[in-house]
Image: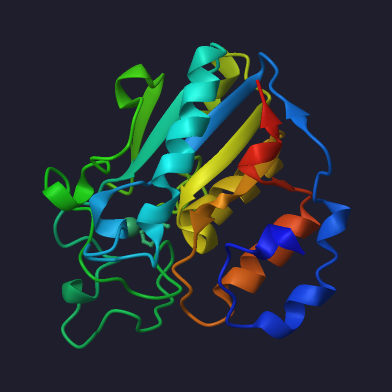
Amino acid sequence: MKIFGNLIFIDAVNVSEMEIQDIKLTGLIKLEQTDGLIVIDMQNDFLPGGALAVNEGDMIIPGINNLTSKFIEDGNPVIFTQDWHPPSHKSFASSYPDKNPGDPIETPGIGPILWPDHCIQETPGASLAPGLANIESASLILRKGFHPTVDSYSAFLENDKVTDTGLQAFLDAMGITRIFLCGLALDYCVYFTAIDAKSLGFDVVLVADLTKPVNAPPGSVSNALSHMRKEKVLIVTADQILI
Ligand code: VGL
Ligand code: ZN
């Protein structure tokens, strides 16, 4: 089951039962004019050394650079997203008197857990990774999570499930019907973006070797993968994508 080679599982017992072949594309996938690439939250705070570091988050940068180059050479839109929080955002544990990062929370629009302060607007931690190529060739840099009391894991809809980031309208205007997803983190922003995109009618392709998970709370990765499987998100590796 090579597709899982680069993913970290806490609940590894379930992996062999996931029947990934139901959605795992075999063979090659050819880019069409109606394809767009969304690179999720490749920001300093999500990389090793950052405030909300994703283990090995930096390892996917070269592969993402190759993939963005492919899309740009082919004239397909590339979109980078940035988690873009004001100070004292309600997803931060520091915004509450007695909370710590990782504590569960059930406030509407926030949760399932609280985070350390991260990706605060105009700080170095919120900047796109310096090793990331093709930023100047992007069609759009989309910022999300800037409403103080609502988090936004998905690049389409904030966590209140109502507030629209404008991404759907942008993709529709560009004639994009299928999106490829990579970046950070698999079990949060990549996952929620994939599910929203499917429910909005886009075809969705997850580039599984160009994403890494936060892996908290336990089970977040297997939950994300099984839900994406159920929603028929295609899962490929970058070497299957041809111009
Ligand atoms: C993310 C947790 C909090 C992400 C953003 O980009 O996946 N995760 N904020
Ligand atoms: Zn965030």
User: Measuring 53% from the left and 83% from the top, which residue is drawn there?
Assistant: 218
Residue 102 picture location, percent across and down: 35, 81
**Closer-to-camera residue (136/90):** 136
Residue 52 picture location, percent across and down: 29, 66
User: Measuring 69% from the left and 42% from the top, which residue is drawn there?
Assistant: 198
Residue 51 picture location, percent across and down: 22, 65
**Closer-to-camera residue (230/182):** 182
User: Measuring 35% from the left and 54% from the top, which residue is drawn there?
Assistant: 58
Where is residue 151, by image quadrant? bottom left
**Closer-to-camera residue (78/106):** 78
User: Measuring 38% from the left and 38% from the top, which residue is drawn there?
Assistant: 81
Side of 38 relative to 222 (left or right): left
Q: Quarter containing ligand 1?
A: bottom left
- Looking at the figure, which quarter contains the C terminus? top right
Using the image, determine if residue 178 lies above or below residue 233.
above
Where is residue 202, by image quadrant? top right
Residue 109 picture location, percent across and down: 42, 61
Side of 180 relative to 58 (left or right): right
Report whether residue 211 is seen.
yes
Side of 4 relative to 38 (left or right): right
